[in-house]
Amino acid sequence: MVKGLSEHDYQQITDFYNQRFQEKGHDIASVGWRDKASQWLRFDMLFRDYNPKGKVILDVGCGFGDLYAFLTQQCGDDFHYIGIDISSELINEAKKKYNQTNADFFVGDLFSIADFTQKDIDYAVESGMLSFKLENNDEYAKQIMDEMFTLSKEGVALNFLTDQVDYQLEKNHHYAMQDVLLWARALSSDFALFHDYPLWEFTVKIMKRR
C-alpha cells in the first residue's frame, strides 16, 4: 500500500491553501479556522493531560505554526517545535512569524519527515489537517495516525470532524468515532477520546505504554 496522499489530492490541497493565502493573506481564515478562541480550544484538547515542557513537539499540517505561540504561553521557551505542512506559502509565513531557535519549519508531508529532522520526537499532534475531503479519507487518516505514533516516543493527539452533525460542507470529511477508536486501540491500550467541548469534532489521544 502506498503511503500518503495521491498526486491528485496533494496538488488539490496545496493549490487550495496557497490560493486561500493569496486571497486572505496571513489570516486565521486562510487555514480554515473561525477565530483564535476555537483554534486555541483545539490546542487545549490536544495537550489535555500532557505537559509539553522540555519536549520535542511535532505539529503535522502546521499551517502558520500558531501552535508555537500556544506552547510558548504554556512553557516559555522550554520546548522544541517542529512544524510541517505541504503548503509552501503557509510555511514561508510561519518561518517569518516564529523565527526562533527552538522552532523548525519544513515543507513536506509526514512520510518524509526523516528527510527534514534528526530530532527525536516526544509528542506529535494534528489539528484540522484531516478534514479536507480526499479520495480515501479513512485510509489516509489511519496512515497518518500510525505514522505519528511510530515516530513519537510518548504519544500523539489528533482531532477529527464528527459525523454526528446536522449538515456537512461538501469540501469536508466527517469521521465516525467508533472507527477512529478502533484505529487507536490497535496502537495502544492507553487512549482517550474527548468529545466534551463545544465544537463539532472530537480529539483522540494515544499514549505509549512504558
Image (cartoon, rainbow, N blue to C red):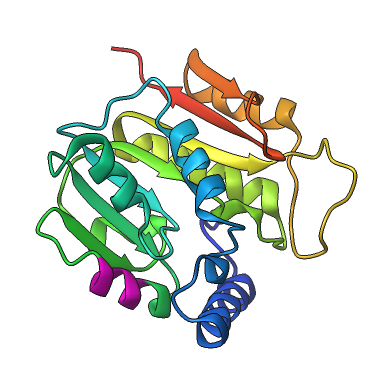
Q: How many labels does the image show?
A: 0
* Residue depicted at 29% across the width and 51% down the height: 68
Q: In which quarter of the image is residue 183?
A: top right
* Residue depicted at 56% across the width and 64% down the height: 5
Q: Residue furthest right?
A: 166
Residue 68 against residue 208 in the figure, above or below: below
**Residue 139 makes an appearance in the image:** yes
Q: Is 174 left or right of 25, judged from the image as shown?
A: right
Q: Is 101 left or right of 159, judged from the image as shown?
A: left
Instruction: Assess whether residue 196 is covered by the magenta stretch.
Output: no
Viewer-side residue, 58 vs 179: 58
User: x, y percentage for residue 56?
Assistant: 21, 41
Q: Residue furthest left?
A: 101
Q: Is 156 left or right of 100, judged from the image as shown?
A: right
Per the rendered image, the range of residues in magenta is 91-97
* Residue depicted at 49% across the width and 32% down the height: 45
Viewer-side residue, 81 vs 7: 81
User: x, y percentage for residue 162?
Assistant: 74, 39
**Residue 116 makes an appearance in the image:** no
Q: In which quarter of the image is residue 186?
A: top right
Residue 134 against residue 120 in the figure, above or below: below
Residue 81 against residue 63 in the figure, above or below: above
User: x, y percentage for residue 175?
Assistant: 73, 41
* Residue depicted at 59% across the width and 46% down the height: 141
Query: Which secondary structure dominates the residues rendered in magenta?
Result: helix
User: x, y percentage for residue 119?
Assistant: 15, 47
Q: Is 84 left or right of 130, judged from the image as shown?
A: left
